[in-house]
Amino acid sequence: MSRIAVLVPGKIHERVLARLKECFDIIEADASALDSETAGRIRGVAVSGTFGAQAIDSLPNVELISSFGVGYDGVDAKHAGSKGVVVTNTPEVLNDDVADTAIGLLLNTIREFPRAESWLRDGNWKPGQNYPLSRFSLKGRHVGLYGLGRIGREIANRLEPFKVKISYHTRSRHADASYDYYPTLKALAEAVDTMIAIVPKTPQTHKTVNAEILAALGPGGVLINVGRGWIVDEDALAAALSSGALGAAGLDVFYDEPNVPEALLALPNAVLLPHMASGSVPTRNAMADLVVDNLIEWFGNGKALTPVPEAPVKG
């Protein structure tokens, strides 16, 4: 297995590199910078980020592209599949951390915990001077999940002990889900007062949380996004928060990361995190291991562990 060449075309988790070096001949370079002989040797790719059609075409003998992350929109999986190349991602291992972050972000947004801590640290808590009552409470809320995949279900499981009503919108109803289903995102927004977005980046989800959806959530409404920044029209969100058309928002993802709009940074009713939902040492190590294990399993046994549907396993 040591003779098999694996390309690492950019920065990736150090555990990926350490484990790959035990099994493969690692080439750290951009695909476009390879000479034809080296490009022809490469049979696997370990990538965190973008790997497009041109890069795939430049590697005539590549068999598997192992992507770090549950979202793999940076990899042209459809093009890879058309060439018989398998693409894998790292699902499941980050579900718990992302779901935990969604709940934490929801509580921080509704109860203003970060602002309250800053208020205390700034020396404002004095005899007779208490932090103002939070405008909102989680009690009695109706939470709508925009997306009910693996992570969405984990979020729902965590919400149930809070005794909130739970509903959801996806492209089609889940027969095994007991929550109320709404066939359109607008219908969901009109029915609930809290929305948690956890859908992937696809052409169909681009800026689907727009001014109309935010208005439907209303002045007491709360938006939480732990999916992709791609989902939300940030200009419309900033305007809604500023005008009071929407009550509050908590975001872990942004449209043009790491650039966060100044309009959002200036708002007291926005809780903003630096895309850290899966950012724990145990979870990132598990993601790194799955990246490597997909390559080992493929070249050892001819089967990928977590192939994405656009690029089915050959054979």
Image (tube, grey):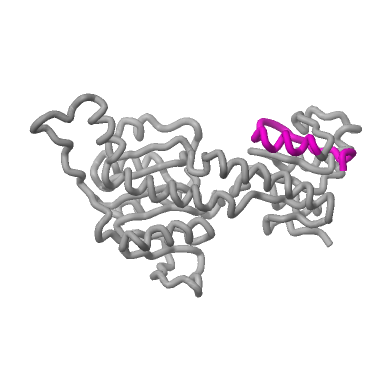
Total number of numbered discs in the rendering: 0
Q: Quadrant of residue 146?
A: bottom left
User: Is 2 in the magenta?
Assistant: yes
- Taking depth in this image into account, of 92 and 230 the one nearest to the observer is 92
Residue nearest the viewer, comparing 29 with 123: 123
Say if residue 267 shows up in the picture: yes
Q: Is residue 99 left or right of residue 267?
A: right
Residue at the extreme top:
123
Q: Position of residue 202 (x, y in %)?
A: 56, 51
Quadrant containing the C terminus is bottom right
Residue visible at 43% across and 32% down in the picture = 260
| Residue 204 coordinates in the image, percent (x, y) | 53, 55
Q: Quadrant of residue 269?
A: top left
Establish if 138 lies above or below 58: below
Relative image position of residue 311 (x, y in whole percent): 73, 55
**Residue 34 picture quarter:** top right
The residue positioned 29% from the left and 42% from the top of the image is 241
Question: What range is drawn magenta here?
Answer: 1-22
Return the residue nearer the eye: 50 or 279. 279
Q: Residue at x 71, y 45 (%)?
A: 66
* Residue 194 drawn at (x, y percent): 33, 55
- Quick check: 173 above or below 32? below
Q: Is residue 24 magenta?
A: no
Q: Residue reaching furthest bottom?
A: 175
Residue 164 placement, left or right of 147: left
Q: Residue at x 86, y 43 (%)?
A: 60
